């Protein structure tokens, strides 16, 4: 069994800018807090998850790849705009993430919904999340018990508007391998949007 998800990988220059943003935010926290409380996503792992499928048998991987090929044939490239950075999910206390909020681009929403429908109809997507698709990029994961231990005045206001964008030209089938040092992501197949 393999842990599989479908994602949009980010161009190298966007990953560089996001890594700089992670450092900028980390510097807002007391150093001992930032190191222990926030597990930052490594630059090479930054991505936008379109659909987390979960555990998949080896023999189902070709079917997953075929579904994204078929979906990509009818999806045109589209712009992706990063609008703001902040704590996430919204209105959740304590927060679980430091994330980059993404604009509700129709092409992105259509693509995510189409992939979810196709994977569910194929029987590969066995558990459908009840909450809707919330496009974001995780920059860091917060250990909530440590967050609760911080005095409110130690919690920095990290929310700010940003302006980064790029054109999405491909989607990827990814495998997540859990390791002690964090997840490692491997691209199983990359498909260009037509």
Image: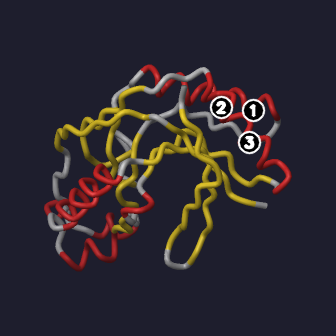
The residue at the point 65 percent across, 54 percent down is 188
The spot of residue 31 in percent (x, y) is 19, 76
| Quadrant the N terminus occupies | bottom right
The residue at the point 32 percent across, 64 percent down is 147
What is the crowding at mark 1: few (fewer than 14 residues within 10 Å), some, or many (at least 20)?
Answer: some
The spot of residue 135 in percent (x, y) is 43, 36
For label 3, the SS is helix
For label 1, the SS is helix
Residue 2 visible here: yes
The spot of residue 27 in percent (x, y) is 16, 67
Q: Which residue is mark 2?
A: 116
What is the crowding at mark 2: few (fewer than 14 residues within 10 Å), some, or many (at least 20)?
Answer: many
- Disc 3 or 1, which lies upstream in sequence? 3
Residue 68 appears in which quarter of the rendering? top right
Position of 83 compared to 180: left or right?
left
Extreme right residue here? 59
Disc assigned to residue 61:
none
Q: Which residue is mark 3?
A: 64
The spot of residue 80 in percent (x, y) is 36, 32
Residue 154 appears in which quarter of the rendering? bottom left
Camera-side residue of 142 and 99: 99
| Quadrant the C terminus occupies | top right
Task: Give above or below for 94 relative to 180.
Answer: above
For label 2, the SS is helix
Whether residues under marks 2 and 1 lie with C-beta atoms below 8 angstroms apart, the answer is: yes
Residue 142 visible here: no
- Disc 2 or 3, which lies upstream in sequence? 3
Between the C-alphas of marks 3 and 1, the distance is 11 Å
Q: Which residue is mark 1?
A: 120
User: What sort of colour scheme is used for the picture?
Assistant: secondary structure
Question: Of the residues tagged 2 and 3, which is closer to the observer?
Answer: 3
């Amino acid at each position: 069994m393999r842990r599989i998800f479908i994602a949009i990988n980010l161009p190298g220059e966007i990953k560089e800018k996001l890594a700089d943003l992670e450092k900028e935010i980390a510097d807002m926290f007391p150093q001992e807090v930032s190191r222990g409380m926030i597990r930052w996503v490594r630059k090479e792992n930054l991505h936008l998850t379109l659909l987390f499928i979960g555990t998949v048998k080896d023999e189902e991987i070709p079917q997953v790849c075929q579904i994204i090929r078929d979906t990509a044939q009818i999806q045109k490239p589209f712009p992706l705009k990063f609008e703001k950075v902040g704590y996430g999910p919204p209105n959740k206390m304590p927060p679980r993430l430091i994330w980059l909020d993404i604009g509700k681009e129709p092409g992105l929403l259509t693509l995510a919904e189409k992939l979810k429908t196709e994977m569910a109809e194929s029987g590969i997507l066995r558990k459908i999340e009840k909450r809707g698709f919330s496009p974001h990029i995780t920059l860091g994961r917060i250990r909530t018990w440590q967050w609760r231990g911080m005095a409110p005045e130690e919690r920095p206001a990290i929310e700010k508007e940003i302006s980064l964008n790029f054109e999405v030209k491909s989607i990827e089938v990814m495998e997540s391998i859990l390791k002690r040092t964090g997840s490692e992501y491997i691209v199983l197949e990359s498909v260009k949007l037509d």
